[in-house]
Image (tube, rainbow, N blue to C red):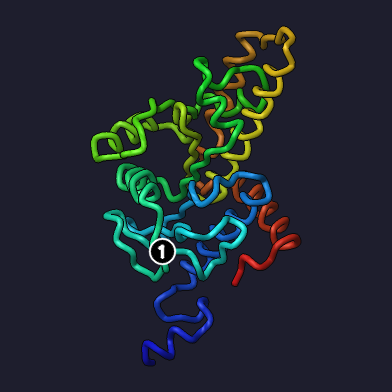
Amino acid sequence: MSTATALKLPPQHRPDISPEEWQARLDLAAAYRLGARFGWTDLLGTHFSLRVPGTRDQYLVNPYGLLFEEITASLLVKIDLSGKLLSGAEHGVNPAADRIHGAIYAANPDIASVIHLHSVDGTAVSIQKDGLLPISQNALIILGRTRYYTYGGLDLDDDECSKLTAALGDGRILIMRNHGILTTGRTIGESFSWMFRLEKAAKIQIAALAGGRELTPVDPQVVERTVARGARSYTDDHWSPGARIEWAAFRRKIDREDPGYAQ
């Protein structure tokens, strides 16, 4: 089969895209469309990414120049950990995707998905000195997997990337001070579910503080028990059945409301 003929085939039938990669593309494109509906966008910045199945040094990410609502499975860009494009993109990719996502994948072979946002509430929490407060069930569930990274500016050199990955450590959630928020997972379902919970906790915190009334604290023993239980979320050896069930529900939602992502 000639290259010209192959490029005219539907993406899921192209010889350079395995069935496993096509399914990964569908998952990632669905996540972008859901992110658009949840208001997780920031112009052309921020990224969701997913490691190409069966590889250690390749991942899929959005091409620069497209809004989240425009992303489709076939438009996603394949890139390696050195930042080299392995598939076409008119404007390439935002360098921040290569630096942040590539660094995390290189440092953590068990991580297969990364979501990074500059959402209003998430960034607002990142700016507050005490970070995420133990004032809601949503926050308590994720606090045990949450870590903090001190803002190092726009220029993420190798040293700064090392600081970022060290700050994440064994966590799954990274609050990037004065910058934004980030979640990771072994599957798109894990990283997406972590982000959904983080965003909800941040919204609750900002709303509660904006109310101008004294907050009701949670009993310290309850905090300790709930944080410990939440830290065990998605830690089983069967690729998180809970996250799979949650992600399947999200996929059904976007299939009903915006099926164009599957092109």
Indicate the quadrant where residue 261 lies.
bottom right
Disc 1 crowd rating (10 Å Cα; few below 14, some 14-19, many 20+) is few
Q: Where is residue 211 in the image (x, y as percent from the top left)?
A: 74, 16
Indicate the quadrant where residue 217 lies.
top right
Instruction: Identify the image quadrant of the N terminus.
Output: bottom left
* Residue at 56% across, 57% down: 67
Vertical comparison of 10 with 126: above or below:
below
Instruction: Identify the image quadrant of the C terminus.
Output: bottom right
Q: Mark 1 points at which residue?
A: 91
Vertical comparison of 121 with 54: above or below:
above
Q: In this view, does 70 lie to the left or right of 147?
A: right
Q: Where is residue 129 in the image (x, y as percent from the top left)?
A: 50, 16
What kind of residue is marked 1? His
Q: In this view, does 108 lie to the left or right of 223?
A: left
Secondary element at image label 1: loop
Residue nearest the viewer, comparing 4 with 221: 4
Q: Where is residue 150 in the image (x, y as percent from the top left)?
A: 38, 25
Q: Position of residue 124 (x, y in %)?
A: 56, 27
* Residue at 51% across, 70% down: 74
Q: Which residue lies furthest to the left in this view?
A: 159
Residue nearest the viewer, comparing 9 with 186: 9
Q: In this view, does 47 lie to the left or right of 217?
A: left
Residue nearest the viewer, comparing 252 with 212: 212
Residue nearest the viewer, comparing 144 with 205: 205
* Residue at 56% across, 62% down: 71
Vertical comparison of 83 with 111: above or below:
below
